[in-house]
Image: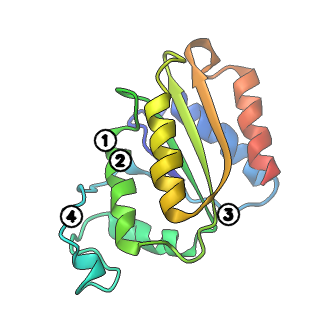
Amino acid sequence: MLNGSPRKNGNTAALVTAFLEGAAEKHHNITVIPVCSKHISGCLACEYCHTKGNGVCIQKDDMQEIYPLLSEAEMIVLASPVYYHSFTGQLQCAINRIYALDKPKNLKKAALILSSGSDKVYDGAVYEYENSFLDYLNLEIMGIFTAFDKQNKSEEKLDELRAFGRSL
């Protein structure tokens, strides 16, 4: 899971925790990467990874910890608050840097968890997720979960995320 929230105890964190609780009940092995506490630079578009690098990014930052996990993962979950109708910048940098791997060989499924103050802000993030991320990586969509305003941290929404974690 790539958690793009900078707030350790915020709304996105509550949704992530609920998902993890449900997944733990079924003994799933999930690694959460708090991308906002990592040093992950933006993609340089230098194409080193696809020419001389053989799938290795020229930049040596905290993505080096994430690449092996992505290579082994069967599923990826992106979690983010919605800022300016999209993912946080920190999460966007991590997503862009997955390009170095091209298409991780074991990665087959994906899910999206978004939180915000309004229900009218998800379109940009969902569009990018479905039309860029999922399509490019050819991933099966396992679900899109959103929470806004009073839904954030509500027992109903947290139960929904727990159930999703259990369903995998």
Mark 2 surroundings within 10 Å by alpha-carbon count, few (fewer than 14), some (14 through 19), many (20 or more): some
Identify the residue shown where x is 54% and y is 33%. Answer: 114
Which mark identifies residue 45?
Answer: 4
Q: How far apart are marks 1 and 4 (CA)?
A: 17 Å
Amino acid type, residue under disc 2 in the picture: Gln
Disc nearest the viewer among 1 and 4 = 4
Q: Distance between the residues labelled 1 and 2?
A: 5 Å
Q: Mark 2 points at which residue?
A: 92
Q: Which of marks 1 and 4 is nearer the N terminus?
A: 4
Identify the residue shown where x is 58% and y is 43%. Answer: 112
Which quadrant holds residue 99?
bottom left
Disc nearest the viewer among 4 and 3 = 4
Q: Which of 42 and 162 is in front in this view?
A: 42
Name the secondary structure under disc 1: helix
- Location of the C terminus (image quadrant): bottom right
Q: Name the residue under label 3.
A: 29
Residues marked 1 and 2 touching at CB (< 8 Å):
yes
Q: How far apart are marks 3 and 1 (CA)?
A: 27 Å
Is 141 on the left or on the right of 50, as rendered? right
